[in-house]
Image (tube, grey):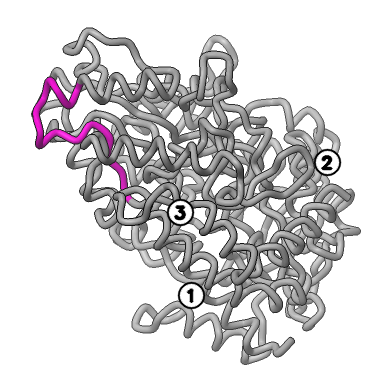
Amino acid sequence: MKRSKFFVLCAVLAMLLASCGENAASSAPASDGSTSAAESSSSASQASETGAAEYPDSLRIWAPSFSDKMSSLGVSDYNACAAWQTISQNTGTEITWEYGSSANDPMINFNLMLSSGEYPDMIAMGWDTVPGGIAQYAEDGVLVDLTDMYPTNLSNVYDALNNVDALNYIKASDGRLYYVPEVNDRPGSGVYQGLVIRQDMLDDLGEEAPATIDEFHALLTKAKETYGDSFYPLTGSGFNNTIGIGPLLWPFGITYDFYLEGDTVCYGPLSDRFTDTMGYIHTLYAEGLIDPDYATQDRNAEKGKIMSDQSMVVFEFQPSAMMEAMKDQNPEFQLVGIPDLKETEDSPAYTFNREYLSNLTVGSCVAITTGCEEPEKAANFLNYIFSEEGRMITNWGEEGVDFVYGEDGKPQWTDEYRALAGEAKEYLHVFGALSAFPSLRSRDAYLTTLPEVSVQAIELWTEANDTSRILPPVTLTTEEQDEISDWQADLNTYMDERYSGLVNGQISIDSIPQIQQELRDSMHIEEILAAYQAAYNRFNG
């Protein structure tokens, strides 16, 4: 494979991940100091904290771009974050952050950095989903193989990954380990979005939250009849994502993309349930129960309709942001999270959101480059961040300033910390997600930052969702990616058009068998499925 082509592809992805990371940061879990992973790695943590480990004198860390959020706080470097300052002091490592010029597209900066052949010590970016897989970078002499360092220099990271059964998720197509990811501290910690509904409207209608697709249909119908023709009960932004109306496929046990049935990789539009699923969604649309703007509007417009009484149901992040925005305008406004819908009362509430399964945060990863003169010491530095001491620094900040220990022995925020603006709390004191750097993130600390309505929503989604059909984020080899990339682009374009037409009625539901035949005859779906099946088989070892 041509190296330049590969770098361009990775650059594009890096920028997308950087953008996605900023969008999700305010909703994704922050970190804390819960004890489960710390106990499993206590001996390594003690070594790190007593100075037994050797750390580099300095590190150059490159990231695709600097956070707009931190820029808005009047700083220009991640070292402005107090957590980074403390880590630097405790390890004796001077950290130099490098970013491309703000005048350039980050993709240009990324390509320039790689093509120079002069690499920093570490590159922080979305190594977990680079096209062709991260192994190509090691083969090209850019990255250091960390496999043998994981049980030793990276023992805290190793234990954290094993604690949530996530080690397989970071293995490259060759079975090796090349990066350190953002790890959640216990299973289910990646859950922070789902089905959200206006509780005040439910009360006004005298109804309970729906559990099945029939109950959902009945509720939307009653809301439409009650609130008028210009009221569209379900809104969203797009079809094939977890925030749009795509999750309406989930109750039928399928999704718009690739998923699992047992150990077999399947494609939603080829399922024998696809006709029933799209028929259900089209019926909702035809009856005026789905916002006709769903395909073209963004999340701000979607949330605006929920807050302005034009809609009542949406697939969204935990509801605290909208609740906060409406607390003065409409004191009666109340949102709650409810479980994902089931087909029947006895059916599973399937989810196909990969973050619910992986216990890792997409995009926040770091790799050590061949430009690093002391890679083992650099690995020790990363390991310190995942130690007990490092975790408290990155998740809770400075004891006595940001947090204190309560009578129950658990950390709690100080009044001074709570009085800070939200962005300053996360980005200037603890390890905000926008620092583009991995740590061990805790569900407990995240929940302490949320109002009770959001805590209840997240805990409910965690308990209710069935994740058994989620295809994990498998890695295609360079050869597989090269073979199917053009086919997959054509497939996505083809199906995007079909989804839109099937929903709004421009394409008849009766034509689905012909669409499925077209997928088999002309869209190379069998070859694409074979590539994903091979990748999943490798994932399973």
Q: Which residue is mark 3?
A: 511
- The kind of residue tagged 1 is Tyr
Q: In the image, 49: left or right of 195? A: right
Which region of the structure is painted magenta? 223-237
Label 2 element class: helix
Q: Which residue is mark 2?
A: 44
What amino acid is at disc 3? Ser
The crowd level at tag 1 (other Cα within 10 Å; few <14, some 14-19, many 20+) is some
Q: Quick one: label 2 or label 1, which is nearer the N terminus?
A: 2
Q: Residue at x 12, y 20 (%)?
A: 226
Residue at mark 2 to residue at mark 1: CA–CA distance: 32 Å
How many labels sit on residues?
Answer: 3
Dividing the image into 4 quarters, which one contains the N terminus? Answer: bottom right
User: What x and y, as percent, mark residue 132?
Assistant: 70, 72
- Alpha-carbon span between mark 3 and mark 2: 60 Å
Is 449 above or below relative to 155?
above
